[in-house]
Image (cartoon, rainbow, N blue to C red):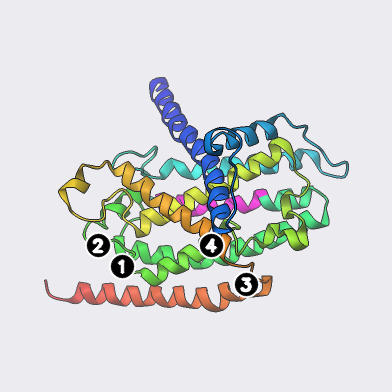
Amino acid sequence: MITEFIIIIIKGIGIIVPLLISVAYLILAERKIIGAIQKRKGPNIVGIFGLLQPLADGLKLFIKETILPNSANIFIYLMAPIITFFLSLASWAVIPFDEGFVLSDLSIGLLYVLAISSLSVYGIIIAGWSSNSKYAFLGGLRSAAQIVSYEVSIGFIVVNVLLCSGSLNLSEIVLAQQAVWYIIPLFPLFLLFFISSLAETNRAPFDLPEAEAELVAGYNVEYSAITFALFFLGEYTNIVLIASMITIIFFGGWLPPFSIIIFQWIPGVVWFGLKVAILLFGFVWVRAAFPRYRYDQLIYLSWKVFLPFSLGWVIFTSCVITMMDWLPT
């Protein structure tokens, strides 16, 4: 029993440490890519090509003094970033990086990820309320409404994937795409899922909970030093997580794109990482290319466009699968 516990701890560390390193360098890559798109240089001073910039930024945040507002509810104020950060790590327990390369291969892994992502809004709401700042409070309310709105359409999109694969296990969903990746028959749903993911992770052009123009920095306006760092790490960890989920349910996870012998020799975890990296580039490119939505446009898009379309596609997928079951073999 003790040995199994130690093995699980080692596996967990083996996932968390590379994840945090990848998050740090995702931030650097984002700054470099946006700089190139805007025809300017990104970070290039600290280390060769600026490669030590994430370490310098992290060290700066960890050694700064944590400012506690006098009017804040201190205990809840400090718990909010901790909750956000740990919930962002919890979902990775069921993410399969390769066949058999998963910490916990739950039969309801997809449902587990949706449940954890739903809980993440609590950290933001708590942060907005406990700061006792009108800007933070408005940011928290915006985030709650935004996440709840887009999780409805995400849920219906996931139901389509469930109908096609016949399983909630993430590894089985990947293996069900050996003949064809789900992005081909479900391409419109992929577009909806990608756009909804931007709203779910508070990314541009849907970064309204932390809109600098009207809310200064939104729910984390009163946070500094290590508490701000935890919010920042949690946000970018969720971005990598959602890119991994898109890879699993639409791009065949660790499966190679073609049944070519050379591709078969490349480890599955390499294919998985490459697909996630391409999707992360898409997240960064959207931030640099598109202006921010108005809040009424954001809610309209969710309830009047995405929800009817995703619900209608569930009915369509159900009808197609039922008809295929009726056909003689």
- Structural crowding at the residue carrying mark 2, measured as other residues with C-alpha within 10 Å and reported as few (<14), some (14–19) or many (≥20): some
Q: Secondary structure at mark 1?
A: loop
**Labels 3 and 2: the sequence-earlier one:** 2
Gap between marks 2 and 4 measured at Cα: 27 Å
Secondary structure at badge 2 equals loop
- Nearer-N-terminus badge (1/3): 1
> On the rendered structure, is 250 left or right of 322?
right
Type of the residue with mark 1: Ile
**Disc marking residue 205:** none
Is mark 3 in CB contact (under 8 Å) with mark 4? no
State left or right for residue 102 relative to residue 230: left
Indicate the quadrant where residue 58 lies: top right
First along the sequence among labels 4 and 1: 1
Q: Residue at x 81, y 43 (%)?
A: 73
* Relative depth, front residue between 235 and 91: 235
> Residue 31: horizontal and vertical position, in percent?
58, 49
Q: Earlier in the sequence, mark 2 or mark 4?
A: 2
Q: Which mark is residue 180?
A: 2
Check disc 4 and report the residue beneath it: 286
Q: Nearer the viewer, mark 3 or mark 4?
A: 4
Magenta region = 109-123
**Mark closer to the chain start, 3 or 4:** 4
Q: Which residue is mark 1?
A: 184
Q: Is residue 307 above or below residue 65?
A: below
Foreground mark, 2 or 4? 4
Q: Is residue 135 magenta?
A: no
- When asked about the image quadrant of residue 56, the answer is top right
C-beta proximity under 8 Å, tags 3 and 2: no
Give the amino acid at mark 2: Val
Q: Residues under labels 3 and 4: Cα distance?
A: 19 Å
In depth, the one of 4 and 273 nearer the eye is 273
For disc 3, the marked residue is 299
